[in-house]
């Protein structure tokens, strides 16, 4: 298994950067949780999160946890501030451009910028705690500027959050050789892709037991193939929730 430590920047008493009605800690958590969800599509990936709620976690606690777990990769997700615009990412400033960490970052960077709809500010190096104190290859991404309205408007859009997460996951999959995902790999796992802007999921196989909505372009792993429920059909997806099998709303495919 490939162990990936996903670090949602800031949290709790540390909001990170703020602007345009947003706090960095909330945006990083949304992206990180989607990264976790999408990594669940890969059979050989396992994830540990620095936090899954709005709680305070010190920088040392994050790197100590990743090191103790023996993570293979450390991904730290942040939002920028200071009056710029666009995307950039960081590796530690002592690393050469031909280091393994730089090569992994090159692969991830290329996939993130395909999907994030942000200008590309480049691949950078800095002496940051999580990059310095993590004992495995590490990258920190800065996903737009919270104090620039055009970037912040994107952060308020669930589809943008999903796309940023998907870009990171596509990059991790390529860089780390993850298998069985929606963007490659072999096998016969069935997936569905949501075709409409907003679609209900269900807690049980009951059309009245609505859970949460999912968005266009989201992909889910099918764990129970379509079966008849009332007048229609449902799948069960990996989270345990149920979703319509109508081809009007979802597209099924196998990889
Ligand atoms: Zn930050």
Image: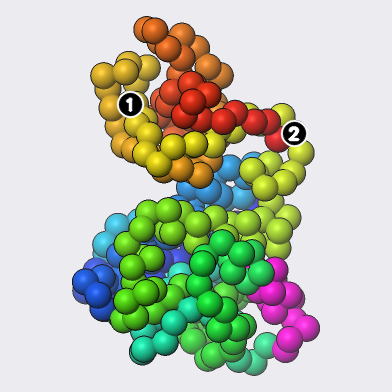
| Residue at x-position 35% and y-position 31% | 200
Q: Quadrant of residue 125?
A: bottom right
| Residue at x-position 73% and y-position 55% | 177
Most foreground residue, 133 or 166: 166
Place of residue 9 in the rendered image (x, y in percent of width and height, measured from the top left) = 39, 71
Most foreground residue, 214 or 139: 214
Is 174 within the magenta?
no
> Which portion, as a residue range, is magenta?
96-108
In the picture provided, is 14 more to the left or to the right than 58?
left
Place of residue 35 in the rendered image (x, y in percent of width and height, measured from the top left) = 49, 55
Label 2, label 1: how many angstroms apart (C-alpha)?
A: 28 Å
| Residue at x-position 55% and y-position 68% | 74
Place of residue 34 in the rendered image (x, y in percent of width and height, measured from the top left) = 45, 53
Most foreground residue, 111 or 51: 111
- Name the chief secondary structure element in magenta: helix
The crowd level at tag 1 (other Cα within 10 Å; few <14, some 14-19, many 20+) is some
In the picture provided, is 237 more to the left or to the right than 57?
right
Q: Quadrant of residue 203?
A: top left
**Residue where numbered disc 2 is placed:** 187
Is 99 within the magenta?
yes
The crowd level at tag 2 (other Cα within 10 Å; few <14, some 14-19, many 20+) is few
**Residue where numbered disc 1 is placed:** 203
Please tell me which of labels 2 and 1 falls first in the chain.
2
* Residue 160 position (above or below residue 234): below
Looking at mark 2, is its residue's CB closer than 8 Å to ligand 1?
Answer: no
Does dot 2 land on a helix, a strand or a loop? Answer: loop
Place of residue 143 in the rendered image (x, y in percent of width and height, measured from the top left) = 46, 73
């Amino acid at each position: 298994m490939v162990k990936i430590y996903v670090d949602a920047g800031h949290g709790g008493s540390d909001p990170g950067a703020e602007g345009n009605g947003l706090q960095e800690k909330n945006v990083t958590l949304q992206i990180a949780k989607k990264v976790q969800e999408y990594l669940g599509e890969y059979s050989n990936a396992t994830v540990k999160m620095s936090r899954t709620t709005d709680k305070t976690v010190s920088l040392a606690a994050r790197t100590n946890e990743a090191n103790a777990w023996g993570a293979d990769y450390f991904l730290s997700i942040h939002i920028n501030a200071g009056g710029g615009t666009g995307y950039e990412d960081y590796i530690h400033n002592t690393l050469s451009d031909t280091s393994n960490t730089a090569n992994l970052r090159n692969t991830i960077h290329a996939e993130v910028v395909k999907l994030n709809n942000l200008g590309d500010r480049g691949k950078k190096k800095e002496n940051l705690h999580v990059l310095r104190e993590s004992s495995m290859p590490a990258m920190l991404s800065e996903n737009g500027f919270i104090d620039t309205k055009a970037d912040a408007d994107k952060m308020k859009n669930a589809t943008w959050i999903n796309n940023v997460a998907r870009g990171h996951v596509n990059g991790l999959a390529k860089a780390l050789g993850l298998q069985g995902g929606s963007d490659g790999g072999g096998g016969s796992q069935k997936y569905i892709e949501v075709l409409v802007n907003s679609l209900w999921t269900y807690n049980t196989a009951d059309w009245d037991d609505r859970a949460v909505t999912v968005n266009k372009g989201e992909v889910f792993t099918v764990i129970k193939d379509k079966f008849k429920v009332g007048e229609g059909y449902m799948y069960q997806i990996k989270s345990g929730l149920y979703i319509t099998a109508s081809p009007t709303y979802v597209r099924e495919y196998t990889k």
